[in-house]
């Protein structure tokens, strides 16, 4: 039971430390929308989403008023469209139906233009992957994700190669908007089925028909708490744990209330420290508060490991249903501390890759030169997948080759997506390695039966 004292204690976090419920995400199963006709399937998809999610925005606003905690985004995730559209084709038509439904319901984003090809892909799935750039270019709110690797299956290098090409094509098709299509595309290893955050959210095949997952974020709360700590790193970890506990309790309250009001299952609370471009809402600033002069300095990976671990421990103590990714995100364009560090050269792409071994996701919202070859992007995806597969964790790449721009320039995406300096990426070619294709086998540690 969540006490009034816990709620009131949190009010100060809301008013001065940027605590918010980053998103309420409704997961919707689309299996009953499958037909042999692309037109009929798209119509059923539209009808189900608009029916189930019609009150999502109003309920989110009502909960924000009830508890005095801002609910920033209201989102929907759906069953992977590669599965829903396999019988009929017409994947882009389904994407357009999703986009219309998102506009009708007033939600911010809709995720699930997704394929799970970690071990291999059918011809239908390959056909689907080829439609991703077009789907992202012709819609506003649709987000796409592809799982190309897992610790059990290894890395599907054929899919990795293809996704490098799809990222390049998405960048070109949205070149008039700083290649923003790529900001809605994530390539995963070990993707989770209950992630409330975009662009990687999709509704897993093992989920109920309608589920509420909530993402709570509070980088400013954690930084404020650490400003009062004058002890060693053990004291730092304890402070982060206690803060994460309090924030997660708020998330659970919101999630259960939303599920009841929307007649849905309560899924999970994801306590991910997801930053925004706003001052005081930065994961980078937390790491600097621990004692780093700048994010990217030696010691950054160790500090991030401490933060990520403490967040998870605090969250797990607060709720029996902590899930999603739950940790610390490091999206460059969405974090003012990361933006400044990258702009001044303190934070490199290589250091970001090292940091991804110990945080929640991976190379996230990183802008690179628009003329970066597709095979280099594929190799970056492969590197991140290798970290995830070997360490049995989720990793991902959301990289944006900004068409027409190069190192020293900046891309602007607006809103929560922020802005990003164009970062340098190695120009040495991995073409022969990527062209080999095939599958990188799963590590020995995957044999646990």
Image: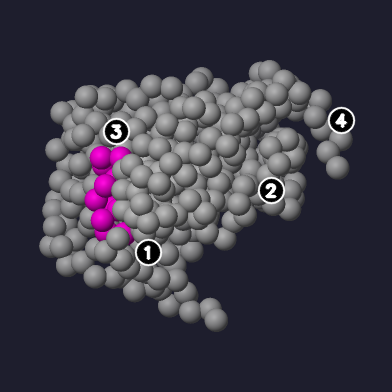
- Cα distance between the residues tagged 2 and 1: 28 Å
In magenta segment, residue 199 = no
Sort mark 3 into few (<14), some (14-19) or many (20+) by Cα contacts within 10 Å.
some
The x, y position of residue 116, in whole percent, is 40, 59
For label 1, the residue is 118
Residue at (63, 30) in percent of width and height: 55
Q: Which mark is residue 138?
A: 3
- Cα distance between the residues tagged 4 and 3: 47 Å
Q: Earlier in the sequence, mark 3 or mark 1?
A: 1
Q: Earlier in the sequence, mark 1 or mark 4?
A: 4
The x, y position of residue 101, in whole percent, is 47, 33
Residue at (57, 60) in percent of width and height: 206
The reply to whether residue 447 is in sight is yes
Q: Nearer the viewer, mark 1 or mark 4?
A: 1
The image quadrant of residue 384 is bottom left
Sort mark 1 into few (<14), some (14-19) or many (20+) by Cα contacts within 10 Å.
many
Query: Callout 4: helix, strand or loop?
Result: helix
For label 2, the residue is 265
Q: Earlier in the sequence, mark 3 or mark 2?
A: 3
Q: Count of labels shown?
A: 4
The image quadrant of residue 11 is top right
Sort mark 4 into few (<14), some (14-19) or many (20+) by Cα contacts within 10 Å.
few
In magenta segment, residue 130 = yes
């Amino acid at each position: 039971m969540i006490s009034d004292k816990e709620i009131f204690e949190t009010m100060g976090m809301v008013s001065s430390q940027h605590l918010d419920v980053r998103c309420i995400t409704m997961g919707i199963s689309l299996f009953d929308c499958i037909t042999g006709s692309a037109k009929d399937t798209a119509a059923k998809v539209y009808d189900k989403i608009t029916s189930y999610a019609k009150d999502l925005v109003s309920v989110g606003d009502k909960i924000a008023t009830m508890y005095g905690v801002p609910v920033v985004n209201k989102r929907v995730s759906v069953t992977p469209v590669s599965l829903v559209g396999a019988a009929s084709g017409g994947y882009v038509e389904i994407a357009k139906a999703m986009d219309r439904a998102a506009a009708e319901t007033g939600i911010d984003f809709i995720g699930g233009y997704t394929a799970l090809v970690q071990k291999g892909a059918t011809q239908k799935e390959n056909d689907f992957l080829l439609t991703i750039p077009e789907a992202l270019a012709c819609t506003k709110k649709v987000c796409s994700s592809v799982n190309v690797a897992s610790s059990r299956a290894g890395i599907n290098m054929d899919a990795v190669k293809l996704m490098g090409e799809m990222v390049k094509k998405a960048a070109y098709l949205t070149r008039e908007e700083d290649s923003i299509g790529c900001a809605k595309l994530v390539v995963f290893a070990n993707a989770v089925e209950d992630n409330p955050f975009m662009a990687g959210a999709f509704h897993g095949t093992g989920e109920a028909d309608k589920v509420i997952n909530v993402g709570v974020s509070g980088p400013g709360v954690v930084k404020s708490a650490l400003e009062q700590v004058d002890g060693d790193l053990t004291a730092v970890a304890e402070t982060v744990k206690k803060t994460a506990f309090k924030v997660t309790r708020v998330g659970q309250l919101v999630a259960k209330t939303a599920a009841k009001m929307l007649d849905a299952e309560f899924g999970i609370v994801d306590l991910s420290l997801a930053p925004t471009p706003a001052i005081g809402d930065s994961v980078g600033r937390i790491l600097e508060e621990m004692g780093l002069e700048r994010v990217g300095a030696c010691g950054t990976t160790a500090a991030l490991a401490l933060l990520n671990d403490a967040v998870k421990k605090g969250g797990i103590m607060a709720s029996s249903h902590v899930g999603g990714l739950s940790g610390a995100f490091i999206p460059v364009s969405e974090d003012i501390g990361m933006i400044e560090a990258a702009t001044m050269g303190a934070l490199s792409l290589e250091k970001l890759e090292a940091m991804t071994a110990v945080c929640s996701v991976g190379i996230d919202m990183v802008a690179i030169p628009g003329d970066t070859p597709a095979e280099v992007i594929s190799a970056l995806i492969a590197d991140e997948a290798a970290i995830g597969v070997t360490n049995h964790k989720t990793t991902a790449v959301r990289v944006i080759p900004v068409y027409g721009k190069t190192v020293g320039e900046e891309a602007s995406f607006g809103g929560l997506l922020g802005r990003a300096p164009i970062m340098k990426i190695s120009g040495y070619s991995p073409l022969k390695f990527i062209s080999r294709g095939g599958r990188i086998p799963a590590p020995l540690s995957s044999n646990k039966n």
